[in-house]
Image (spheres, helix red, strand yellow):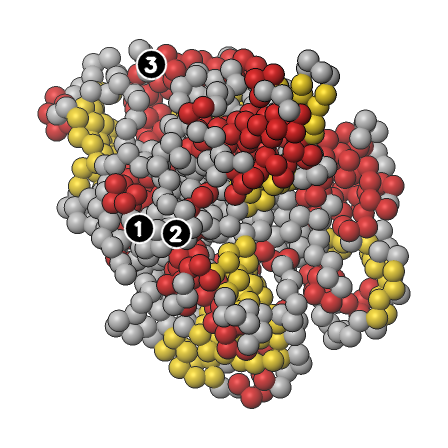
Amino acid sequence: MSTPIDTPEDLLKLPAGETVNLSRRRFLVGTTVGALVLGFGLPVGAPRVQAASTTERGTQVPAFLELRPDGSVRLLSPFMEGGQGVNTAMAQIVGEELDLDPARFLVESAPAGEAYVVMENGLRITGGSMSVRMSYPTMRRLGALARAMLLQAGAQRLGVPVSELTTEPGKVVHAASGRSLGYGELAETAMDLPVPDPASVTLRDPSQFRWIGKPVQRLDAYDKSTGKAIYSIDIKVDGMLHAAVQHAPRLGMSVGGLRNEEQVKAMKGVHSVHQLPGAVAVVAERWFNAKRAVEALQVDWKEAAADSQVRPMPADFSTDGWRDHLAAQTGPSRDEENQGDVAGALASAKTTVEATYHNQYLNHAQLEPPSATARFNPDGSLEVWLPNQAQDMFRDDIAKRTGLDPARITLHSPLLGGFFGRHFLYDSANPYPQAIALAKAVGRPVKLIWSREEEFLRDAMRPMAVVKFRAGLDEKGLPVAIEAVSATEGPTEALAGKQGDKVDPTALEGLSGKAYAIANKRTAQIYVKGPAMLGYWRSVGNSLNDFFYESFLDELADKGGHDPYELRLQLLQGNPRLTTLLQAVGELSGGWKRGPFTAEDGSKRARGVAMASPFGSEAAVIAEVSLEGGQVRVHDIWQAIDPGSIVNPAIIEAQVNSAVSLGLSQVLLEESVWLNGMPRARNYDLYPVLPPSRMARVHVRIVESGAKMGGIGEPPLPAVAPAVANAVAQLTGQRVRSMPLSRHTFS
Amino acid sequence: MELRINQQTYQVEADADTPLLWVIRDDLGLTGTKYGCGLAQCGACSVLVDGNVVRACVTPVAGVVGREVTTIEAIEHDAVGKRVVAAWVEHQVAQCGYCQSGQVMAATALLKHTPKPSTAQIDAAMVNLCRCGTYNAIHAAVQELAEGGKA
C-alpha cells in the first residue's frame, strides 16, 4: 500500500507497481528534483521491464518506434501534446539521430509503462516545462540506437560489413556499390535485432544538425486546422452511453436525496440516474439529453461529514474574506532562505520600504472541458480515454480506485485541448472516477463530459498569497536588504498535505533564489491551510511571485531614485548571462525608455521591465501600456528568453506568444471570485479570459547562452505581469500591488 | 427532421430545441466542431449556416432546417475555406488546436462576405477565444488572406 516518501531517492527506489498514496505522501523539500513533480511521485509502470537505470533509460527501441513499409515512422512519445509542440520536438530530436526527416513522423502518446520513463529525474510527466530538457540526450540516443539497428540490418541484407554503410535521410546506403535500402524495407529485420550497447553509438555533432534548432513545421498544423485532430472529448466507442453530472454546490457535500428522480428518469433519452460521491449523474443515449436531465435533478445536499475524504468547502468562504485572512496572519513563518543579517541591515538602512501585495485565484480555463470514456471489456480489463499529464500516475490511481491490477488497465491519452496544469491528478477535479463508476453500473461503455459549468465548479485553483515586503536602501538608494514573507498555501502542500516544518517550494518559487546582488535577504512562508482545492497553473509559483517581487523591486528603484532598468543592471553586475538578457530585451524594444511619452497616435504611454528565472530558463520582458477609457491597454510585449539551447525557434516564439497571453490575462482581467463557498463564475460569461482585442503585439528574441537546457512552456509567462504593472505605475503614478488590474481604478 | 449538412441530407431525430452542435457531434459523428462553453461565449462551435458564421451550441437544430450547414469537415470543399486552411498551416497558427475549427470557420465567413477586410473588420470578426494565445498568428493569417497573399 502506501509507502512513505522522504527523498527523491525513495521515489526512485519504489518498486514498479507500488502505489503512492497522494494524501499521505510525505512532503519533499530542499531537493534537486524539479519542484513541480513533488506532488505526484513516481510514475510506477507495469513490471514489464526492470526499472531502467540512467544509462538504460529510453533504450527499448521497439517500444518507441514503428518503422512502416512506406518509410514513415510512428513514434510513441513519453509526453502529451497539448499545444506546446512537444510531438514535433520529439520528431526533430529522434529524427536528427535516426536520420529521418521529422515530417515523416506520426507521433502519438505512449501508454503507461516503465519503458517510457525517460526523464533524467526518473519521472515521466508532461509538466514543469520538463519534457524536452529532461529527455533530450535520451531521445537523441534512442534515435541513434534505431539508426544503428537499421545499419546492422542493412549489412545483413546487403551482405557487406556495417562499416561500409552509411545513412541518408530514410535509407541505408552502400556507397561502394551504389545500393541502398529504405528504412521501411529494413524495418522488420532491424526491429528483431538486439538493441546495441547504448555506449556504442555516437551522437551527431550539433554543428551538423539538420532539424534540431530549426523552425521545423509542426506535425499537427493541418489536422488542427481542419477538425481532424482527436481530443478526449471526441472519443467514440461502440455501444457507449453518454453521461453528465451535477456536482454538489460545495466540495465535501453529499447527496441526501433526490426529489424528482422519477420525473427525470422519464425525460427523453434518459437511461438511468445515479448517485455518486459529491455528485449526481444521468446516463443517456445522447450527451445533451444527459445534461438537460441532470440539471433538472432536484437534489438535497448534505453538509460535509466530519470525516470528509475531500476538502470540505464552508458556506461562508469568499475570496475577499480569504485575502483578508491571509493578510491578518502574523506567523509563525518558516524560512526558505535567509542570507546575511536582514534585521540588522534594515535597522541601519538609510531608508526602509514596506509594501503588501496579493494575487487572485485563477481557473485553468482550457477550452476543452474535461471528459473521460470508460469501457470494461469482457475479460474484466478496463480501458479509459482521458486527458492527463502523467499516464502512469493516472493508471495507478485508477488501479487504486478499482482494485484492478495496473496491468489490466489501458490508458489512452488523446491530444489535450489545452492544459496549463489542469490535467494532473487532482482528486476531486477529474471526471474519470465517475466515468468508471458509471460504466460499471450500467454495464456499457460510458463517455462522461463535464459541462463548462461543472468544470469551473470543480477546477483546482491557482493559489492566492499575501506577501509582505520590507526592504532597506543605503545612502545611494541601493537595496541592501529585502525580506518577503508570504502567507499562503502552495499547490504541492495542498495536494500532498503539509509536511512538518518544510516549506513548499512551489509556494515560494519566484520570491526566493533571486539573482540580484542584495546582500541581506530573507524569504519565508506563513503556511495557511485553506479550504479551496489548489492546483498547478502554468508557471506555478512563479506566476504570482515574480509579479510581487519584480513590482516591489520597481518600488525600491523609485524610492532610491534609480531607473528600474538601470537598477537591475547594477544588481546583476558579474552575471553575464542575465546582463546579456536584459540588454537584449532593451535592444529589442529599440532601447530602454521608461516614459511617460506621447506615442504617434497621441496616446500617453509608459514602459515597464521585469525579469524571471523560471523552470531552468531566464526571461526578461518590457511592456508598453496606455490607458483607454480608464482601462489598461498593453500595446507591445518585448521578451528576450534564454533557455540555454533550443530545439525549435518557431515553436518557442509561439510559446512565448502563448505565455504572454496568459500573463496578460492574469494581470489585466482574470480572476475566480468565490462567494458563499462557491465560485461566482461558472462559464466564460463571468470568467473573462484574454480576448483577441486585448492581446498585445509580441516581439521575441531567443538568446542561446549555451547554459543547461531549460524549459519553454512556462518560462515566458511570469515576467509579463510585473512588466505591465510597472509600466502602469509609471504611467499613472499609482503603484499596482494586486492582480488583476480590472479591480483597480485608473484616471 | 431533415438537415442539409456539408452538401448531404441527413434524417435526424432530435428535439427541435436541441442545439445544432450536439446533433452534429453525437448524431452525425462530426467531431471537428467543438464544445467549449455552451453559451456562445467562446466560438469553438462555430459553423456556417447559409454562409454565415453561427454558434452551434446555442442554435436550435430546428432553426437550420432548409438551410445549408457547413462544418469544418467540409471547409476545404469551399474555395475560400481552402485558402484559409492553407494560411492556417502556413502561419502555423494552431497550438492545442481545440478552438481552431471555430477560428477557421469565422475567418472563412469573414472572407466570403468581405474578401478584402480592413484591420478593423478583421478585429470585429475574429472574436473567438483562444486560451493558447494564438491571436497574433490568427490575425497575421487573415491579414495575409485579406491582402490576397501567397496562401
Which of the marked residues, 1 or 3, is nearer the chain's N terminus?
1
Same chain? Circles 1 and 2: yes
The residue that appears at 50% across and 32% down in the rendered structure is: A142
- Marks 2/3: CA–CA distance: 47 Å
Query: Around disc 3, counting alpha carbons within 10 Å, would you say few (fewer than 14), some (14 to 19), or many (20 or more)?
Result: some
The location of residue A160, given as percent across then percent down, is: 62, 21
Chain letter of mark 2 equals A
Q: Between residue A229 and residue A527, name the one nearer to us.
A: A229
Q: How many neighbours does mark 2 have within 10 angstroms: few (below 14), some (14-19), or many (20 or more)? A: some
In the rendered view, does A590 fall on the left or right side of A477? right
Quarter holding residue A602: top right
The image shows residue A98 at horizontal and vertical percentages of: 58, 27
Mark 2 = which residue? A47
Amino acid at dot 3:
Asn
Q: Disc 2 vs disc 3: which is toward the camera?
A: 2
Label 1 or label 2, whichever comes before in sequence order: 1
- Of the numbered discs in the image, which one, if any, rests on residue A15? 1
- Crowd class of label 1 (few under 14; some 14 to 19; many from 20; radius 10 Å): some
Question: Which dot, 1 or 3, sits closer to the camera?
Answer: 1
Q: What chain does badge 3 belong to?
A: A
Task: Mark 1 and mark 2 in contact? Answer it, CB < 8 Å.
Answer: yes
Same chain? Circles 1 and 3: yes
